[in-house]
Amino acid sequence: MKIRIGKRRRIQFTDKKHPFWGIVSALISLGALVMMVVIFLCAGNAKGQGGIAYGYLGIFNLVLSIVGFVMALRCYKQDDIYVTTPTIGSIVNGMIIIIYLILYIMGVL
């Protein structure tokens, strides 16, 4: 049991904790976001002649984001947790998944 002092200077006793998989999901989301920005910048500097390596890295990043998203969603089923890290993980991973799906759909058309 931890003692937490809130904004109003009162003591709260709580058994809540940050779930391990929520923290991992948030770290995956931050890593995937950095990786996405690096891939976009490198592909832009190559002016469309980057080769298939950028495509493979993008697909790997998409799969990594899907794994992080699923991990974040599984954390919501646990009791007595702080939902900050799973929320960060699910929102950022979800945005990365949407961006990559839009990019791949535009590439097909």
Image (cartoon, rainbow, N blue to C red):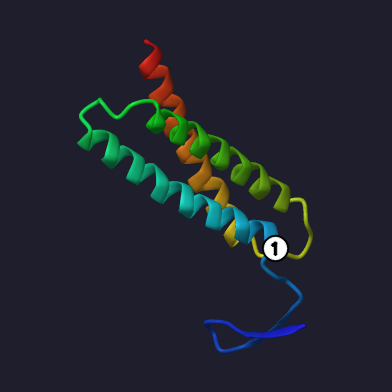
Which quadrant of the figure contains the N terminus?
bottom right
Residue 11 drawn at (x, y percent): 66, 88
Q: Nearer the viewer, residue 40 or 26?
A: 40
Report which quarter residue 40 is drawn in.
top left
Q: Is residue 108 above or below residue 96?
A: above
Q: Is residue 77 above or below residue 45?
A: below
Q: Nearer the viewer, residue 33 or 81?
A: 33
Report which quarter residue 44 is drawn in.
top left
Residue at image position (47%, 47%) is 32
Residue at image position (77%, 51%) is 77
User: For the residue marked with disc 1, what is the amino acid?
Assistant: Pro
Q: Nearer the viewer, residue 91 or 48?
A: 48
Q: Is residue 27 above or below residue 42?
A: below
Report which quarter residue 53 is drawn in.
top left
Which quadrant of the figure contains the C terminus?
top left
Residue 54 drawn at (x, y percent): 38, 32
Residue at image position (60%, 46%) is 68
Residue 30 drawn at (x, y percent): 47, 54
Q: Nearer the viewer, residue 29 or 64?
A: 64
**Mark 1 highlights which residue?**
19
Residue at image position (63%, 42%) is 67
Determine the secondary structure under disc 1.
loop
Q: How many numbered marks have been drawn onto this rendered protein structure?
A: 1
Density class for disc 1 (Cα within 10 Å; few <14, some 14-19, many ≥20) is many
